[in-house]
Image: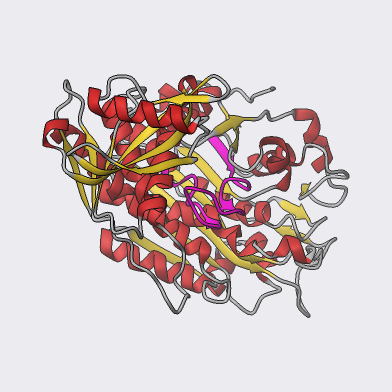
Amino acid sequence: MDYLAQRWTQLECDAIVVPLLAEGEEESAPPRGLPKPLAALAGELALHMRAKGKSAEVQFLCPSTLPQARWVLGVGAGKRGDFSLRIAREVAGAAVRHLRYRKMERVAFALSGLLPAPVEARGIAEGALDGLYEGEKYRSKKRAPTVESLIVLAPDRVAPRELARAMDQGARETQWVTLARSMVDEPPSRLPPSEMARIAAELAKEAGLEIEVHKGAALRKLKMGALLGVASGSEEPACLIVLRHRARSKAAPTLALVGKGITFDSGGLNLKAPTSMESMKMDMAGGAAVIAAMRTIADLKLNVNALGIVAATENLPSARPYKPGDVLEAANGKTIEVQDTDAEGRIVLADALAYAVKQGATQIVDVATLTGACMVALGRTTMGVFGRPRGWVDTVMRAAQEAGEPAWQLPLISEIKEDLRSQIADIRNTGDDRYGGAIRGALFLEEFVGELPWVHLDIAGPAWRDKKTAFGPVGGTGFATRTLVALARTLARRPSKAAFGPRKPHAG
């Protein structure tokens, strides 16, 4: 794929995409600042179609009377005040999905002018590549998209080469988001923990990452009774996948990225309902995001020590699974009473987080499809953010905003922690009711990070798209990969640990 930026007078393409911004209830309009011939054509067509500008809705594809393009495609971009990097991606994804098999080799995009031009250009490249992903690896017949070049219409005051560089950078990083998506989309029998480890090892060899994979006796030596307990119902051995990227500077911080890697979650003996189990191959999406982020960090050669840790196993019933009422001992010595075998993600993360502490992490972020409760609270498009101290949480939130991934902070409410009190162990893995379930999961994880700055990202909703949209198919989204990379980039720019503030738990 070629990534280009051209002036209007130099433009030559098969189709030009114009974002339509909502204006009132029944009308939409092209962005301000377009070349007059294009603005006039797009305005007339928008008025004729009475388009509402709904985000990512393809409004029209019509023949062009302009010498620069054969076709003009209008795509809804939502309200002017709501336009963001995420919307720019969705507009580009919807446009490319509409044009991909229509013999359109050169597709150009007009900018909205509502974001800095390089940021929007980058988002267009990212969204277009996201839109070309189909997840059809196992189909016997596949169609190849015809789009070969993406072009951004460069405003007068911006150098085309600057926009082309931004597009190229976005595409470069999106290839690893696509990797995360493809891992999530793999059938569970094709991606057991050992295969996840093999993929990580292959990527490590390509990028110069250090890798260790701990199994069996090595996990017992590390005293990872929590991970081994969850894995006891499966014939597939559990893996602790550890990736390391070394910084150029000795003073650089050590950022630990910890991912949940449940390659299939049946619920264990607390078996899920069949309809809840259908998509549970995606329960390793947090681990996939960590692996993809580590590969990107290495590709960018960021000046940060990054430690990627994935606790990978299946959660299955069998003749010898872990059981409600069991007590498991985690790697930091804390004992866990198992109340519900379907709350297994926090149990395997307990060992992975404790390992990150022992490995000298200075800051920790864990990412997991942890709770349905977070989906109830925030829906399917937004991740829940928990953590402390405030400075570190704010840093992660800014990274999510930079990455264009919706995030909302939720509180660590100390009263809810009482629900985790066990009569026979240090802590139990669930409470007595379903209220505050996402907060309870985060409070459980906090027990295994010591005093380190820590953030938990619950991506249960946005990690998986359960319905086909204008900009993407059903399946994995690669969500959180971009946030983790943006966070590593932030630390590479601002390495001082003091920048993240004192340890003060959030009360709400």
Q: Give the quarter of the image for residue 199.
A: bottom left
Q: State which quarter of the image contains the C terminus.
A: top right
Please say if 84 is above or below 272.
above
Coloring scheme of the render? secondary structure
Please say if 438 is above or below 21.
below
Q: Position of residue 228 (x, y in %)?
A: 64, 67
Relative horizontal placement of residue 302, taking residue 288 as reference (left or right): left
At a point 53% along the width and 34% down the height, the residue shown is 406
* Residue 89 seen anywhere in this rendered image of the structure: no
Give the magenta part as a residue range.
454-483
At a point 48% along the width and 39% down the height, the residue shown is 56
Q: Position of residue 125 (x, y in %)?
A: 31, 44
Q: Position of residue 313 (x, y in %)?
A: 60, 67
Q: Nearest the camera: 430 or 186?
A: 186
At a point 69% along the width and 72% down the height, the residue shown is 232
Question: What type of secondary structure mainly makes up the magenta span?
Answer: loop
Marker count (numbered): 0
Relative horizontal placement of residue 208, taking residue 242 as reference (left or right): left
At a point 56% along the width and 54% down the height, the residue shown is 468
